[in-house]
Amino acid sequence: MNLNFDIGNVTVTEFGVGRDDGNGQSFVAVPVDASVQAAIREMVQATWEAMQRDDDEPAKYEPSEKHGGIEYLYLPLNDDLAVSVRELHQAANLDVNAHALAEPSEVFCYFARLRDGQQQHLTALRRATQFKGILKSKGRLVRILDDSLQMIEDTVFKLDRDFDLLIDSANVHILRPSGFEFAGKLQQAILDAVPENIQAIGTDLSFVEFASLEQYAIKHPRAARYLASIRGQGEMSNIDRTALMRLCKQTGVEVTESNGKLAVDTGHEMGFLEVLDRRRYELELVKGQPERFKAASRRKIEDQ
């Protein structure tokens, strides 16, 4: 996958932080000198190089997947799950606050916004862990000055080696899925989207009773993630009722028919969502010995 940005021809480099003062989150720009700007550009380069180490094309980010700590994924910038980082990327002007780091505990991320010679924009973002971590050692840091060691009394921040994600005009390029989820506040966003996702899926699967599933999902984040993934597949309207019932029976998910609809038995909500998310299946490699499995991760195999 290509990056819609020329890293080797950066003309503008801006730095900023995301702050949460208890009254909500906000993003502000922070003035930095040329040395910091150079370090930021090196971080962007290191991030893109890390993404290119895998020869395979990146998979699309899906909320129901259990992704690795470092795994190159992508998400279209116009996807609903990208709304928070998209707003940062597309913000025309950010407030400038030279004192934004005065309260380090309020900083939850830092970011850079770059522009290249073709006026293309790139946003890079990192969760503020190491960036703030060195503050714990404040008062115990020393430096060489005038051939002697002296204590560092000033507040010191440490930039990371790379960013968690890069955003260009088309996609969010994700190096650390957990960093993307944190920055995008996805956990709460996915839980908040349960009613909307249920309504959308229920429209396509009108023969399924979803009321109990909605009540279950709003209390269980993993179930809410499955719903977001199922809706994102966009193939629900083609599901055959008989085939769905057969797969549920084969994989141990209990459903009953009530008032012309399929109702999921209590205790089988997750199993039913796993069926819809193409995660439960049965194999019979040994004749007469069918085996049931649940896929921790699944990727569709395309026809050759």
Image (spheres, rainbow, N blue to C red):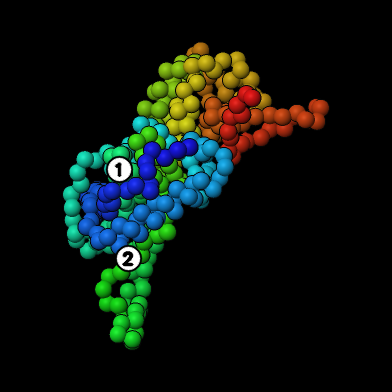
* Point 36% across, 65% down: residue: 158
**How far is mark 1 from mark 2, CA to CA?**
30 Å
Mark 2 residue type: Phe
Confirm whether residue 97 shows in the render.
yes
Label 1's element?
Answer: loop
Q: Secondary structure at mark 2?
A: loop
Q: Which residue is mark 2?
A: 157
Residue pictured at 44% horizontal, 53% vertical: 46
Q: Is residue 173 found left or right of 25 in the rendered image? A: right
Q: Position of residue 45 (x, y in %)?
A: 42, 52
| Relative image position of residue 106 (x, y in whole percent) | 27, 58
Q: Quadrant of the C terminus?
A: top right
Which amino acid, mark 1? Gly
Tag shown at residue 241 = none
Residue 254 appears left or right of 127? right
Mark 2 neighbour density, 10 Å: few (under 14) some (14–19) many (20 or more): some
Spot occupied by residue 282 in the image (x, y as percentages of width and height): 68, 29
Relative to 137, say whether 215 is above or below: above
Question: Mark 1 vs mark 2: which is more N-terminal?
Answer: 1
Front residue (pair 82, 122): 122
| Residue 121 position within the rendered picture, expressed as x and y whole percent measured from the top left | 31, 41
Mark 1 = which residue?
117
Residue 127 showing in the rendered view: no
Residue placed at 48% from the left, 41% from the top?
A: 73
User: Marks 1 and 2: which is nearer the front?
Assistant: 1
The quadrant holding residue 101 is bottom left
